[in-house]
Image: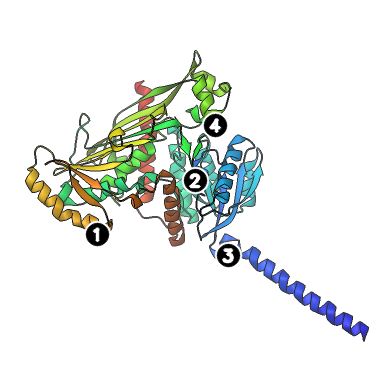
Amino acid sequence: MEEKTLLLVCSFLLVLAGLFGCKKTVKESEQKPEMTGEVQLIALAPGHFHASLVQKISYPQISNDVYVYAPEGDEVREYLKAVEAYNTRKDSPTQWNEIVYTGADFLEKMLGEKKGNVMVIAGNNAMKTEYIYKTLQSGINVLADKPMVIFPEKFDMLKSCFDVVKEKNILLYDIMTERYEITTQLQRELSMQKEIFGKLVEGSPENPAVMMESVHHFFKEVSGNSLKRPGWFYDVEQQGEGIVDVATHLVDLVQWECFPEQILDYAKDIELIKAKHWTTNMDLSQFTKSTGLAAYPDYLKKDAVNDTLKIYSNGEIVYRIKGICAKVTAIWNFEAPPGGGDTHYSIMRGTKADLIIRQGAEQQFIPVLFIEIPQSVDPKVASADLEKNFLNVEKKYPGIGLKKISDRVWEVQVPQKYHNGHEAHFGQVTEKFLQYLKDKKLPEWEVPNMIAKYYTTTQALKMAKSSN
């Protein structure tokens, strides 16, 4: 009797073990993205704070487990510190579980283990194009911080990346946060209202139809904390010059706003006219304040003159795109004035109105969009057309309004709810990418326009260096 009871108990325990074993196996299989479509992130060498900003919020499509592969050092520690701050904040904390591997063979380890289906990369740009290429070859989608290429000689490799994307039926997408700034969206929307804007003028190198200028700062706050930059951020051979870095956003906006959802052919539609670059000078005390390093690393000594670091972080490109003359300018200062931050200026000149974004002290360093009527246009007629047709824009962006400044100047008033800030734009880009991932495709114009964008920046750098 005891033997029979013991046998029954053992059988029952075996059944339970089998059930729990099956449950564990199912759970593990559910975590595999190739079986369920769940997005599993890989963070590769996260050396720039943009890597953590992708994880500032949670996404229902993305597993909380994030596989991190990086070299040992301060950069990965700063990234993990930022993610932990998001996990432990009081309001809407995230629940990321960082599974970290550090070592010199981090790339090979990531490619060999292939733990996820989306690799996020934001860090040192020297090898970024190669990292993207090898990751795509292994069949992993890539969400890349800009720039995806900083050297003119590696532009062809980036083009090859998109050949791999097509072959593997996966996605490569760069993080263009500036498309999500509300004044930029409204500038684009108003430029498509012909009764308000007319059409884009052709412009000239001396007076371009489109001008965009971005001013950034080496020392600033991110998520409420002083940003600690790695030393290599000041080496143009690792971070890239401003003309191929920040200018990427500006070139993207020119394409996205002036030719919405149109396919661009870089070989036919882009004509570079002139390009130049110049340095921002930084002393050792500023460098230390920004990086925490007491001396310039050896790789920066080539750029130091009498303890002053000369960084080619500024650049300007004048070019024609489908016959329209445009100018973009990227500028880096060490620190913003009190109460200030990074700023953006943009003008699109139309036959009926100019659309201008200003973000200076007069605007309390908050971007504001103005509609200005040129002297060649009757202000009464233009104002009547503006008030009548602005309703089309209000329907798409409820709550926005018009404030008349003078007979020829109007301010577009935007409710606070639309001003969500630069950091929030990383989540918006990621959500857009997740939708593309679900659809298994990008819009038809995105890939050729990414190629056109990086052709413009890399060839502009080549021109700036040759003209120097």
Q: Position of residue 161 (x, y in %)?
A: 47, 46
Task: List the residue tagged with mark 2.
Answer: 53
Q: Amino acid at mark 3?
A: Met
Write down the quadrant of residue 343 in the picture: top left
Residue hosting label 4: 230
Q: Residue placed at 24% from the left, 59% from the top?
A: 395
Do callouts 4 and 1 mark residues in contact (Cβ within 8 Å)?
no
Label 3 close to label 4 by CB (< 8 Å)? no
The mark lying in front, picked from 3 and 4, is: 4
Q: Is residue 372 visible?
A: yes
Which type of secondary structure does the marked residue at label 2 adopt? helix
Secondary element under disc 4, as helix, strand or loop, is loop
Q: CA distance from mark 4 to mark 2?
A: 17 Å
Residue corresponding to mark 3: 35
Label 3 SS: helix
Q: Residue furthest top?
A: 306
